[in-house]
Amino acid sequence: PGAGEVRIKVHALGLNRAEVLLRQGLYLEKPTFPSRIGYEASGVIEAIGEGVTGFTVGQKVSTIPCFSQTKYGVYGEHAIVPARSLAIYPDHLTDEQAAAIWLQYLPAYGALIQQAGLKSGQFVLITAASSSVGFAAIQIVKREGGIAIATTRSASKRDSLLEAGADHVIVTDESDIVAECKIITRGKGVDIIFDAIAGPMLVPLARAAAHEGKIYLYGALSLETTVFPFQIALKKGLSVSGYTMFQVTEDPERMAQGQKYIYDGLADGSLVPVIDKVFAFKKLAQAHEYMESNQQKGKIVVSVP
C-alpha cells in the first residue's frame, strides 16, 4: 500500500448492480483498461501505508464505496484501498454480512433520512424492493415508523418482502401501481418514493405520489429514456431528484452521521443484512450472471478463500 492506503486480505465480496453496469460500460464511470472492479469487501488488514492512523494490522474491516472502483476495485484475494474507505465492523456479523453493509444501507439512509427527512406515519414506496438496497430501505422505513410499500415484478417475491417487513407489496405485472397506491394511502398518495427503475416508470410513480411528494431516482434498471412528468409534477408540486450514495460518502459530516445510524441499527437489531446467496470465489462469473437474472432476494455475496 502507498501513502494513505491499506492492504486487506479479502474474506468476502458483496456484489452490486454498479459492478454489472461498469462491466457493461453503462455505469456513471467508464472503465479505462486495464481496470479494476468491485466496491464492497470484508477482510483483515495485512499492511498499512504511510500516514495512515486509526488502524492496525489484524483488524477486521469492510470497505465503504467512496472510491473509483476502476482504480481500487476489490475483486481479488487481496485488495489495496484508501484508508478512508475502511470501517471496523461489529463482531457479531459474519464475513458475508460484513460485505453487505455499506452499499446496502448507505443509499437508502441518505435518501430516506438525510434527504427526505422520513417521519413516522409517512407512506414510502420502494421500487425493485427485492434488491439488497430495497430490503435495506424497508428496514429503515420500519425503524422510523413509516409504512413501507414494496414493488416487485414477480409474485414469487411477495412473501419474502412481507417477511422482511413490508406493510404492502404491489406486484407490478399483476396490478396497477397507481390504483393500488391510492387504495393503500386512502387517496392521499405516497409521501416518499425511492426508485431504482426510472425510465417510463417515472410517470406512474408521479401519479402515485402525494401532493408535494418526494421522488428519489437512485437507479436506472429500465435502461430506457426517463421522461420528466412535467404536468403532473407541476400540478402536485412534486420534488423529483437524482440521488447517489456519493452525496453521503463525499461529505465527511453526512458520512459520520450515516455510519452512526447504521452502526446503531446493526447494534439494536433493526438493521440486519439480508443475504440471498453465497457463491465461491471461482464462481464469480456465475454470481454476476445470477444478479443479471434478477432472481435475487437481497444481497449476493462471494466467499474468498
Image (cartoon, grey):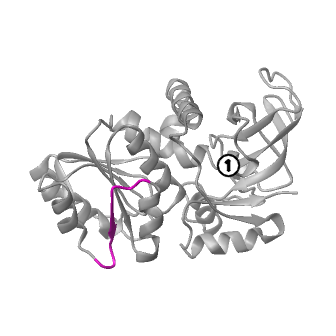
Residue 129 in sight here: no
Q: Position of residue 28 (x, y in %)?
A: 54, 55
Quarter of the image for residue 290 reads: bottom right
Question: With 59 as the anchor, is 99 left or right in this view?
Answer: left
Quarter of the image for residue 198 reads: bottom left
Who is closer to the viewer here, 21 or 46? 46
Who is closer to the viewer here, 184 or 44? 184
Q: Position of residue 131 (x, y in %)?
A: 51, 61
Question: With 133 as the anchor, is 5 left or right in this view?
Answer: right
Who is closer to the viewer here, 236 or 304? 304
Quarter of the image for residue 13 reads: bottom right
Residue corresponding to mark 1: 97
SS at mark 1? helix
Q: Is residue 92 magenta?
A: no
Who is closer to the viewer here, 75 or 138? 138
Question: With 159 as the anchor, is 175 left or right in this view?
Answer: left
User: Farthest residue in the bottom direction?
Assistant: 174
Residue 124 in sight here: yes
**Dominant secondary structure of the magenta stretch?**
loop
Residue drawn at the location 72% of the way across and 41% of the way down: 62
Q: Is residue 171 magenta?
A: yes
Residue drawn at the location 18% of the way across and 57% of the way down: 230
Query: Looking at the picture, does residue 185 appear above or below residue 8?
Result: below
Q: Identify the amino acid type marked 1.
A: Gln
Residue drawn at the location 77% of the way across and 56% of the way down: 75
Q: Position of residue 123 (x, y in %)?
A: 26, 48
Q: Position of residue 165 (x, y in %)?
A: 42, 53
Number of numbered discs present? 1
Question: With 240 as the anchor, is 41 left or right in this view?
Answer: right
Q: Which residues are magenta?
A: 165-174
Residue drawn at the location 16% of the way across and 62% of the way down: 183
Please state, as top left, top right, bottom left or bottom right, where the C terminus lies in the image. bottom right
